[in-house]
Image (cartoon, rainbow, N blue to C red):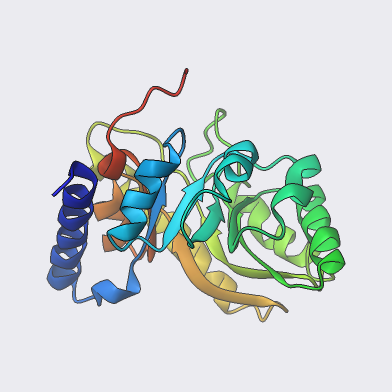
Amino acid sequence: MCYIEKNIKDLREEIHEICSKIGRNPEEIQLIAVTKTVDHERINEAIHTGVEDIGENKVQEIMEKYNVVSSVNWHMIGHLQTNKVKYIIDKVKLIHSVDRISLAEEINKRAKQHNKIMDVLVQVNVANEETKFGLANSEVFDFFEKIQPLEHIRVKGLMTIAPYEENPEDVRKYFKMLKEIFEEIKTKGFQRVEMRYLSMGMTNDFKIAIEEGANMVRVGTGIFGRRNYNK
């Protein structure tokens, strides 16, 4: 058994164990394998082990890997520049990082050109970190109001990136906040909004995220090991 297969097996067992403790169905948790800087051979190993969804941070990496990776669902999880939407609109299943009206409008425009409805998540900077993208908590509901006219976007939920803390317990409060916003949006009756996914939790804190309601976790290091992002 290669290390990737073992890591995925261990990860799924951890998810099952967490869900058993809190009374959730582990089948509800969607694992997104984060493949930033990972070569296509190792991505294919993960897919052959049962991974069905992979997340990329950069448009360029999606473009480079798209035709050499086995059939899989692609997720754009990193900051997305407006002028690069056109390159991925026909390739990704879900865009996790919608955080401004100009981006939403561009996605809508490009989706219309392809005669499709693009599923997206709205990114919220729950911890209000200066180094992170995403809407402030206070901006979320106004943002949902503003995107109502966009007929080729369907909002499927929310995403956040919690601060990195040595003790994952320290970020629990941020996951709680996002879950509260998620539940409140459900009550607003927005058009073309299906609050289905709560994308939060990474290698260091996915257990806490699941305990607080996440049903999408984005794990890279926990599957592929540590990587040198400066290459």
Relative side of 174 to 94, left or right: left
User: Does residue 204 appear in the picture of this structure?
Assistant: no
Front position in the image: 174 or 211: 211
Front position in the image: 138 or 42: 42
User: Does residue 21 appear in the picture of this structure?
Assistant: yes
Which residue shows up at 24% across the image and 31% down it? 166
Q: Position of residue 64 (x, y in %)?
A: 59, 40
Which residue shows up at 63% across the image and 47% down it? 135
Q: Position of residue 61 (x, y in %)?
A: 57, 38
Height in image: 186 above or below 97? Answer: below
Numbered disc total: 0
Height in image: 35 above or below 189? Answer: above
Which residue shows up at 29% across the image and 51% down it? 206
Relative side of 38 to 115, left or right: left
Q: Position of residue 130 (x, y in %)?
A: 57, 29
Relative side of 206 to 32, left or right: left
Height in image: 217 above or below 126? Answer: below
Q: Position of residue 183 (x, y in %)?
A: 49, 72
State the image quarter where residue 27 is shown.
Answer: bottom left
Front position in the image: 138 or 84: 84
Which residue shows up at 15% across the image and 54% down it? 10
Height in image: 21 above or below 202? Answer: below
